[in-house]
Structure formats: C-alpha cells, structure tokens
C-alpha cells in the first residue's frame, strides 16, 4: 500500500499546519469503527474512527483496494452505536443496507434518541463526513422567525414546512424553478430545478469562515482573500431571507448551528470588510430573541427537538436521504439538482483523457454532492410523546416519594450507582456506606417503565428496589464488607467508589499503599490491585460504557496527577491483558494541578476529562492526556468539590460554600449561582438540560442547567443527602442518606419542559 506520490508537495504550508498529528501511524487497538466512503462520487474511500474521538479518511485507487484494506484492519464494523454486528461485511455494506439493518429508526420513533442524534446517524451512514467539505453533514433550517424580540416555540407559524425543499418554500420562487425544469432545452445535461446545491464545500466554508481551520481553508481556496462583505455570512436573518429570495441560494444548514456558538463570533478579529449598507462585518448578527450565541444555539436546538419538528422531520428525510431524492418523486417535490451531484451519474475510471477527467472532478467538487439514497419508500414518522407515555399526561401527578429503604446499619450511604438497564444479568442499585459495607439491591424494571409499551398495572404494586438479601437478613455481611485498610486521612465520600456498568465490580480508592482496588460484588473478594500513583488515590470516576462494558476509569491523587485507565468489560480488569493484570499501564498521565485532586469526571463521548484540585483550579484534558484549558471560576469560586459533565458539552462545577458555575466545554462561563446548602451530590439529566442537587439540608432540588433557574423542590428528608443517581429511563432518582437509608423519588424531566407545561 505504499505510494510514491507526495501529497505535501501540492499543499500550501498554511494548510499543512492542520495536518499535524496525521503522522500516518495509528494503533490498530484504537480503531473503533470503519465506514466505506465515496470520494468524488466514487466508492473508493474509507473513514476510520479512533478511540480518541478523531477520524481519518483515506482515498484509494479502486474498490478492490478498499476491500483489501478493510480485511487487513480490525473487525470492528461501524462501531457499537447502531445495533449492528461488528463484522467486516458491515464496514463494506452499502448505506441502504446499513439503514435497513440498523435499529436506529425504531429507537428514534420510540424517542430513545433525539432528532439531532438521528440526523447525525443518517448523515454518517449516507457518507456525510467532517473529513470532506464536499460531503459535510446536512441539517435543516427549522425556524422561520429571525425578527421578533421573543420567540414562542409553541406557535406553528415560527416553524418551517419541512415537507418542502428550501427552494420550494417561497411560492413565487418555486414557480421560477418549476418553469426552468419544464422548459428545459439543453441537450448536454438532464433538466434540473437548481443549478446550486443545498450543501457544497463553498457553503460549508462560508458558514464557518470565522473559526480555524476553516478560515485558512477558505482563504486558500480564494487566493488569500475573504469573500465580498455582502456575500459573507454576517447575519442569521439575512441568510434566511436570501435562502428564500435569491434564485441561486438554496443552502440548508450544518450541524454546528445546533451546538457551536463559537462559529458566530469573530474571536480572531479578522477584517471581513464593510457591506454596501455600510455595516461592518464582524460577529454574526443574531436574531433579537438570542442575546448571545449560546442562546441562539440552545433555542435553535430546542426548536429542532420540538414537537413541530418531530412530527414532520421524516418528510425532510424523504427529500434529502429518501424516496423524494431522485426520480419522478423528486420532480414532483421540486427537488432535482444538477445531474453531477448524484451518485452513479459518472464513472471517473471510464474517462481515459486526464484533462477531461480533471475537468469532471472539478465540476463534481463545484456542484456539491447529494447524500447516498438510504430508502426508496416513505420514511416512517416519529411516535408522539403522548402515545409513548400516556401516563405522563395524566391529571393527577404521582407522589414525589416512591419508597424509603432503611439498611440495618446506620452508616451514611455515601455512594449510589443505579445500573438498571433491563438486559443486565442483575439490574440493581448498588449502594456503599461510609464503613464500606456495600449492597446489591435488585431493581424491578416494571415501575421504571411507567406508561411504556408492555407495562402492566398488576406489576405496578412492586416497589422498584428490593434490599440485598445478604444485608437484609444479616446473613452474608462478610461477602459485603470491604475490610482492607484505608488511609486514616481520607474522607470517605462518593468519589472514592466506582461501580462497573454491569454491577459486578466495585473500584475503591484511598488505600495507604497508593493503590486503588477492584472487588467482586458477588463475593466481596479482591480481584485486582492497581498501582501507578506516588501518593494516596483520592478520587475515581468512570466514563459511560461501550457495548461489552468497556469504559475509561480515571484516578486522581494527592500526588496532583490523574491517570486514565481502560476497563476491559470482557476480562473484568483494568488493562487489556489478563496475563499482565498485576501491572496494568495507564493509557495517559494527566498533569497540570499543583494540589491534591479531589473531584473528576470523564466523558468518552467528548473524549474529555475534567478535574478539580483541592485549592483549584479545574482543568480540562483530552483522554490522550493533553491539557486543553483551565476553567476559571468567578470570584470566591476557589475550591471545586463536585463536577458533572453532559455529553452536550456543558460542565457544572460545585465549589465550597454553595457556589455553582456552568461552563461551556470551550471554557466560557455561562451561568453561576449561590445556594444556602452544603451540596454533596449533583447530576445532570441525560440531555444535559436539567441539574439535580442534594446536600446536608436533605432537600432535592431541580434546576434548569443553562441559567440555574429553579424548577422544583422536593419535600425535605429527615437526613442529609450524600449521593444520588438516576435510573436508566430517567424516571427514578435514588438518593443515599446520612441516616443509612436510600430514598427513591419519582422524577419526570418532561414535567418542566415548555411543551408539556399545559399538559400537566
């Protein structure tokens, strides 16, 4: 597979700066997914996704080489997210086959995944990728109101009609396109409605022109100059108007409009010129209803996830990925583009004349590329929230507290882990007390599925949590008590423990010999001792688990460093190799703190570790060990104690004396508050929208994460809260109490969602 062609000779040095890190060397063990890709409409490329959240795209001479390469790479399929077997044939499958065999459409219909996640899935299997500007992921415009001071997301008039392509929304302009198609006279090319595309390299670069590396790519493609100020993306409202009036603009959006506020800010101070109306082009002008870029992205995302979009998104999918993409249905829907944008329209290998071939390649790059067609019948609609969970909308609210479980020991419950997924051998709520007595309390999923299909009322009288029999009848406490000596100076808190996702192992830190240890929850026996730190290990955290139970474990220590470890779900040990389980090596060493590390959170989805030292600050590292930034808290926020990160990229930090901060993943302070409770436990709902807190006052409170607006206060408990976790369906909150009991609360985050206010 050696090639003598040096691509670097063809590349300007400014662009080369961004190929650093592409040393052409990747560990096979780090490969997580392999996708077949098209390049210039030919099926000759591969995209390889790595464990550290990066991906690399390769283009090969022909399809036979692609097949050879796939068979030389690890057998990972397209990863574990889409419910597909990890087989090489899956990596070589067509987009249509991937769509048909995956479980993602059903999961979207059942509302297990968001509209954003589903669109990302469709884009990914249809060949859209961040590694090719000509095939960048496509997202829809969903709002039409960019003018008013307030935006009411319950008014249908503020939403776009998703059953029509951008070009057909304005009836006057639609007539122009229909006439162009019907009066076609050019024999050289089949007829089309639009001579531009909804997604091209040029449009992607123009949206992202303010941030690197896109600024450099843009300048490189335009002789080192920015675009004419009147054509530069300078206002959201203006771009929407143009896409409705200009006959050569039918652009859809890119995913960044729904998650990247930085794209609207000219943070590098580029001179983008002055428009003809004498407005200086600087930051992007936002609609009046968004006071800052973060508001715009958040509200735009809320709109994308709204009921209005949920119930018609399948029609937009029909246009971009589905049966209205080509053929007579596309003609009827006013959805036909230049023939060179479609897969199968040209066979480059059949063009022997190099000049002709180069001209054809340039045209393909110029016209944009339509995604691979995923289905040739109408896409099914999403089920309504009402249909899926009728009990959610009942008049009488369920009572707040479901049950209280009092353990025989009065030792405070200092750690709670609710691994309640039904497919587990033992769905359970695992609790650990201050005296390191743990319990595996079986979880009954019947209650957790309130209102879901298959739910039966005769099962509803079961309480969701059943006390561990070995603890309840005091018969097997020796199998539940960790007796190994902990360093005297360690305060036992929730950070000292991690329970694996299958409930079968507990990891504990704080030992005098600077180790952390792995114990079997079945027998209470020690199964592994892990060394690596130079001082006592003070905190542990685990990432979300992959299928198979693999995850990252992070240990923080008094030696001011953190170590990132890999937990093997197959071997139930830290490290990949059962033969060397006595001395596993950490995946990365994270440095930068000057004091003992007291709290840490790790997110595999984002590839980040966020940690706090006893006397501050909080640091953000990548899972490969690079220090990205410090999160500078506001005044008096000096001593971080708790950290919670959502996969949406928000980080909530609790500091001593009741102070909270919310940071974006790029280090921007978004909100702060102070409360009169010494908080001991915080957690974010799975979508990152809601924060739940509990502390010494014994009160559980629910807040809106983006601005810390208080949403709900549960009735107070008679003891302080030391730990919390949520069941997998986000419907039950379990708290560990200072009195040695656990309390299960009914929680339904939909209750505080603007769309459901009037239904409760």
Image: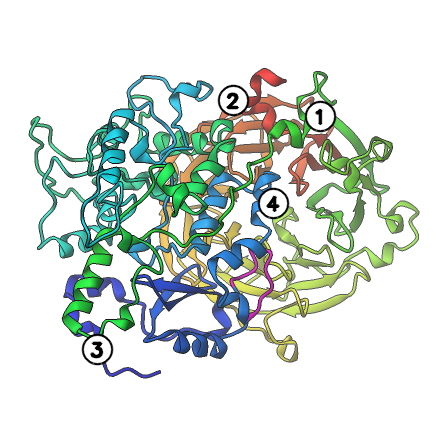
- Residue beneath disc 1: 391
Q: First in sequence, mark 2 or 3: give its number.
A: 3
What distance separates the C-alpha of mark 1 from that of mark 2? Answer: 18 Å
> Is 169 in front, or is 117?
169
> Is 500 in front, or is 102?
102
Is residue 424 at all visible to an observer of this figure? yes
Q: First in sequence, mark 4 or 1: give its number.
A: 4
- Residue beneath disc 4: 106
Residue at the spot x=72%, y=31% of the render? 451
Q: Where, by quadrant of the figure, is residue 323 drawn?
A: top left
Q: Nearer the viewer, mark 4 or mark 3?
A: 4
Q: Where, by quadrant of the figure, is residue 235 drawn?
A: top left
Q: Is residue 84 magenta?
A: yes
Q: Position of residue 666 (x, y in %)?
A: 36, 45
- How many marks on residues? 4
The circle drawn on residue 754 is 2
**Location of residue 228 with respect to 707 vertically, above or below:** below
Q: First in sequence, mark 3 or 1: give its number.
A: 3
What distance separates the C-alpha of mark 2 from that of mark 4? Answer: 26 Å
> Is 538 in front, or is 746?
746
Q: First in sequence, mark 1 or 2: give its number.
A: 1
What distance separates the C-alpha of mark 3 from that of mark 1? Answer: 63 Å
Q: Which residues are magenta?
A: 78-87
Q: First in sequence, mark 2 or 4: give its number.
A: 4
Judged left or right of residue 466, residue 345 is: left
- Residue beneath disc 3: 6
Q: Nearer the viewer, mark 1 or mark 2?
A: 1
Q: Mark 1 and 2 residues: CB-CB less than 8 Å, in contact? A: no
| Quadrant location of the C terminus in the rendered image | top right
Q: First in sequence, mark 4 or 3: give its number.
A: 3
């Amino acid at each position: 597979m050696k090639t003598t062609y040096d691509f670097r000779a063809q590349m300007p040095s400014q662009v080369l700066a961004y190929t650093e890190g592409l040393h052409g060397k990747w560990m096979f063990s780090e490969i997580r997914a392999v996708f077949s890709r098209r390049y210039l409409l030919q099926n000759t490329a591969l995209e390889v996704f790595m464990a550290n959240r990066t991906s690399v795209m390769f283009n090969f001479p022909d399809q036979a080489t692609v097949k050879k390469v796939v068979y030389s790479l690890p057998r990972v399929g397209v990863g574990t997210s889409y419910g597909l077997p990890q087989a090489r044939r899956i990596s070589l499958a067509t987009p249509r086959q991937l769509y048909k065999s995956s479980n993602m459409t059903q999961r979207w219909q059942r509302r297990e995944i968001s509209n954003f996640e589903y669109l990302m899935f469709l884009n990914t299997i249809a060949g859209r990728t961040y590694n090719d500007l000509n095939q960048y992921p496509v997202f829809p415009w969903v709002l039409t109101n960019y003018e008013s001071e307030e935006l009411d997301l319950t008014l249908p008039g503020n939403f776009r009609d998703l059953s029509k392509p951008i070009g057909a929304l304005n009836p006057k302009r639609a007539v122009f396109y229909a006439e162009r198609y019907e009066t076609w006279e050019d024999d050289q090319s089949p007829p089309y409605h639009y001579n531009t595309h909804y997604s091209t390299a040029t449009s992607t670069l123009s949206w992202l022109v303010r941030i690197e590396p896109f600024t450099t790519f843009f300048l490189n493609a335009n002789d080192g100059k920015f675009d004419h100020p009147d054509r530069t993306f300078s206002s959201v409202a203006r771009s929407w108007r143009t896409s409705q009036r200009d006959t050569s603009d039918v652009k859809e959006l890119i995913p960044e409009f729904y998650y990247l506020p930085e794209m609207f800010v000219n943070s590098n101070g580029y001179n983008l010129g002055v428009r003809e109306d004498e407005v200086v082009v600087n930051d992007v002008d936002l609609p009046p209803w968004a006071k800052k870029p973060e508001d715009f992205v958040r509200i735009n995302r809320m709109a994308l996830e709204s009921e209005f979009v949920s119930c018609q998104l399948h029609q937009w999918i029909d246009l971009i990925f589905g049966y209205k993409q080509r053929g007579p249905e596309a003609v009827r829907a006013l959805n036909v583009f230049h023939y060179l944008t479609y897969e199968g329209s040209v066979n480059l290998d059949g063009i022997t004349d190099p000049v002709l071939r180069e001209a054809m390649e340039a045209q393909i790059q110029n016209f944009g590329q339509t995604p691979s067609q995923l289905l040739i019948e109408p896409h099914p609609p999403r089920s309504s929230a009402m249909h899926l969970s009728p009990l959610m909308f009942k008049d009488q609210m369920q009572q707040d507290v479901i049950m209280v479980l009092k353990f025989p020991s009065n030792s405070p419950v200092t750690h709670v882990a609710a691994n309640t997924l039904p497919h587990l051998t033992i769905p359970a709520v695992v609790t650990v007390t201050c005296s390191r007595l743990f319990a595996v309390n079986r979880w009954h999923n019947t209650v957790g599925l309130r209102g879901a299909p298959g739910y039966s009322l005769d099962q509803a009288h079961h309480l969701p949590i059943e006390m561990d029999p070995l603890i309840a009848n005091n018969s097997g406490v020796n199998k539940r008590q960790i007796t190994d000596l902990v360093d005297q100076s360690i305060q036992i808190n929730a950070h000292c423990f991690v329970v694996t996702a299958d409930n079968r192992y507990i990891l504990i830190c704080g030992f005098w010999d600077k180790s952390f240890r792995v114990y079997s929850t079945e027998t209470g026996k020690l199964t592994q001792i892990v060394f690596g730190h130079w001082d006592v290990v003070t905190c542990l955290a685990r990432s979300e688990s992959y299928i198979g139970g693999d995850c990252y474990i992070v240990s923080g220590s008094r030696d001011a460093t953190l170590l990132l470890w890999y937990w093997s779900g197959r071997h139930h040990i830290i490290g990949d190799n059962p033969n060397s389980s006595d001395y596993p090596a950490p995946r990365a060493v994270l440095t930068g703190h000057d004091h003992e590390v007291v709290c840490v959170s790790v997110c595999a989805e984002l590839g980040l570790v966020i940690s706090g030292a006893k006397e501050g600050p909080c640091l953000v590292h990548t899972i490969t060990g690079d220090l990205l930034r410090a999160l500078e808290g506001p005044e008096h926020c000096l001593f971080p104690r708790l950290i919670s990160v959502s996969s949406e990229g928000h980080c909530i930090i609790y500091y001593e004396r009741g102070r909270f901060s919310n940071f974006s993943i790029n280090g921007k302070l978004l909100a702060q508050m102070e409360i009169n409770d010494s908080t001991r436990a915080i957690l974010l709902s799975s979508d990152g929208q809601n924060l739940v807190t509990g502390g010494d006052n014994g009160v559980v409170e629910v807040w809106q994460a983006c601005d810390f607006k208080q949403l709900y206060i549960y009735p107070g408990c008679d003891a302080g809260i030391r730990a919390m976790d949520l069941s997998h369906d986000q419907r039950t909150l379990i708290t560990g109490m200072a009195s040695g009991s656990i309390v299960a609360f009914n929680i339904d985050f939909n209750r505080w969602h603007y769309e459901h206010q009037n239904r409760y």
